[in-house]
Image (tube, grey):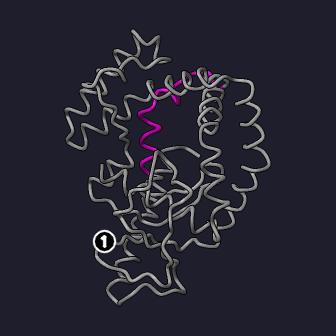
Amino acid sequence: MNIKLFIIFVSILFIISCAHVSNVKENGEFSKESQVQTAINVDNEGIEDEFLDENLDFLDEEDEEYDNNTVYIYDPLYYYNKTIFVFNDKLFFWVVKPVCKGYKAVVPNVIRQSVRNFFINIAAPVRIISCFLQSKPEAAGNEIGRFLLNTTAGGLGFFDPAKNDPRLVFNDENMKQTLAVFGVGNGFYIVWPFFGPSSLRDSIGSVFDLYLDPVPYIDFVTVRTGAFCIYYLNEASFQIDDYEALIEASFEPYEALRSAYVQNRNKKNKE
């Protein structure tokens, strides 16, 4: 699908969703027939990177007494989302996990980390522009400095000498967080095939991130596709244990992953 058409499509969905949520709020609580809520305490600090520690206690939706420190996500696509979740889960355990295990066994950690550094470095435009849009000029300057140092002294970004400079603090910002800073709400929860959990806001933000990332502008389709595959395979090799621990420790894996995702996005948006 053309990216511009996709942006128009999700924007329309976002407007419809916001209008529906506003209408429901005016008439009282959300009805259980029309949606499934996730309640998350925004003060929970057990999040690291994109995944939660397996020992986190997830809130009980029925017993939790909601207050002003609680955030909700609208889940009108519950049955679709759960179907895609099951598909992604089977794909993970049947395909992704075995491939990643083999990849980790063959490729030393130092090389995998270098590949990770390279992709983080070339994605600097996403972080720089996001920092500027969020009125964080110092953070944007740090990212420019990190990019220049790692690209030169770091061998095109395969190494990260900037981490040794306390003045060049890494700022993990993107357009998803920028939209949140602008006051755009989650919209509704959605699970994408292959890519996993997201929200309407974060889905739109991800499209903008793609426009700012250099990889999609590679002319040769084979090289571009290969770059994406290497990135996702390499990144997954660092995260497979986190996902598996979360799923195996959860009585309701779908709800646990949904809660984990929203808690994590909450924390990222507050930073």
Q: How far across and down, in percent of the image, does residue 19 sit?
A: 37, 74
**Closer-to-camera residue (132/6):** 132
Q: How far across and down, in percent of the image, does residue 138 sit?
A: 20, 32
Q: Is residue 95 magenta?
A: no
Crowd rating for badge 1 (residues with CA inside 10 Å; few <14, some 14–19, many 20+): few
Q: How far across and down, in percent of the image, does residue 106 sit?
A: 74, 24
Total numbered labels placed on residues in the image: 1
Compared to residue 35, the image places residue 233 above or below, namely above
In the rendered image, which quarter is residue 2 located in? top right
Residue at (71% x, 62% y) in the render: 86
Please tell me whether mark 1 sits on a helix, a strand or a loop. Answer: loop
Furthest residue toward bottom: 27
In the rendered image, which quarter is residue 149 located in? top left
**Closer-to-camera residue (25/150):** 150
At label 1, the amino acid type is: Asn
Q: Is residue 11 left or right of residue 92?
A: left
Compared to residue 181, the image places residue 235 above or below, namely above
Write down the residue under mark 1: 69
Compared to residue 223, the image places residue 249 above or below, namely below
Report the predominant secondary structure element of the magenta stretch: helix
Q: Which residues make up the magenta segment?
A: 204-221
Q: Is residue 169 left or right of residue 98?
A: left
Furthest residue toward front: 55
Q: How far across and down, in percent of the image, does residue 269 sit?
A: 33, 52
Residue at (49% x, 25% y) in the render: 117
Residue at (35% x, 72% y) in the render: 70
Q: Is residue 125 left or right of residue 33?
A: left
